[in-house]
């Protein structure tokens, strides 16, 4: 099992990517997302990237998952979303239903501005038999209050400027049996964004033409944690 081991902060760099919702919408309109064959999915989920707030200070809706022993992502920071129910075939329907169930926010096709390509989830480098479909939404300039469900420890808005700020780029070193695995991460306050959520946000950042800060492995980091 993976467990928290350590972290290393990146040097400060004041450069930040700034963009507005019009730019995001245009980029998504040009994007052609790749979808997996529904018949090939063993397990399928959808998440919502919900952007809101004034155009010069956009925020994204995020959650911290409640702690459950059976959940491999227990306690992780994530985007609202979840597993498709039997008969659900639309990623948007799944993302919208789960968002309301998890944070009490109603989103629909009037807020939907695009989709990203499906991604296949891996856990510690191994296939996890889960496909995730990210859907992007814009809910206007007002940050709506969020109401966390019993499945969610907390729901909150994160300014996109904090996600793109290089000073918040860091790493997590996690022990997996006898090995130490190093993962890129973003630290916002006392919260860590990494793994699946960071992978989805990185895909989003590439599509809109504002890549998240480049994460380079720190020289000697792996050998340091292996006693080298």
Image (cartoon, rainbow, N blue to C red):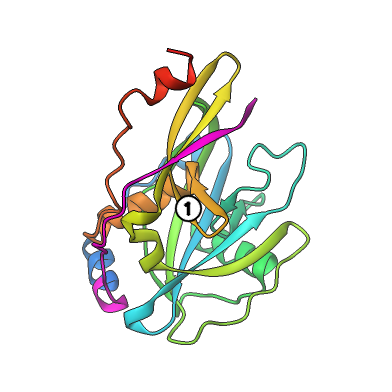
User: Of 11 and 126, which appears nearest the observer?
Assistant: 11
Question: What residue range appears in magenta?
Answer: 1-23
Near-viewer residue (164 or 117)? 164
Res 125 seen here? no
Judge left or right: residue 225 versus residue 25.
right
Residue drawn 24% across the image and 73% down it: 23
User: Which of the 4 image quadrants contains residue 115?
Assistant: bottom left
Res 84 visible? yes
Q: Residues within 10 Å of mark 1 (few under 14, many from 20)?
A: some
Give the residue number, with chain letter if any, for mark 1: 187
Residue 41: x and y in percent read: 52, 37
Q: Nearer the viewer, residue 145 or 112?
A: 145
Q: Is residue 193 above or below residue 37?
A: below
Q: Is residue 63 left or right of residue 26?
A: right
Provide residue 31's location: percent of width, then percent of height. Answer: 25, 58
Q: Quadrant of residue 106?
A: bottom right
Residue at 39% across, 76% down = 58
Q: Residue at x 70, y 40 (%)?
A: 71
As helix, strand or loop, the secondary structure at mark 1 comes to: strand
């Amino acid at each position: 099992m993976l467990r928290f081991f350590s972290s290393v902060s990146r040097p400060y760099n004041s450069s930040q990517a700034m963009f507005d919702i019009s730019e995001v919408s245009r980029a998504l309109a040009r994007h052609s997302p790749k979808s997996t064959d529904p018949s090939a999915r063993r397990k399928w989920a959808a998440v919502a990237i919900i952007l809101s707030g004034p155009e010069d200070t956009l925020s994204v809706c995020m959650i911290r998952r409640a702690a459950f022993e059976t959940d491999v992502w227990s306690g992780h920071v994530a985007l609202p979303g979840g597993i498709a129910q039997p008969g659900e075939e639309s990623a948007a329907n799944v993302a919208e239903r789960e968002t309301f169930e998890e944070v009490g926010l109603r989103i629909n096709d009037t807020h939907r501005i695009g989709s990203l390509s499906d991604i296949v989830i891996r856990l510690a480098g191994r296939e996890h038999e889960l496909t995730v479909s990210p859907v992007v939404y814009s809910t206007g300039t007002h940050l709506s209050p969020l109401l966390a469900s019993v499945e969610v420890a907390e729901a909150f808005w994160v300014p996109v400027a904090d996600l793109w700020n290089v000073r918040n780029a860091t790493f997590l070193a996690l022990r997996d049996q006898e090995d130490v695995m190093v993962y890129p991460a973003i630290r916002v306050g006392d919260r860590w964004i990494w793994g699946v959520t960071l992978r989805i946000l990185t895909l989003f950042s590439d599509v809109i033409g504002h890549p998240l800060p480049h994460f380079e492995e720190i020289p000697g980091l792996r050998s340091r944690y292996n006693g080298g």
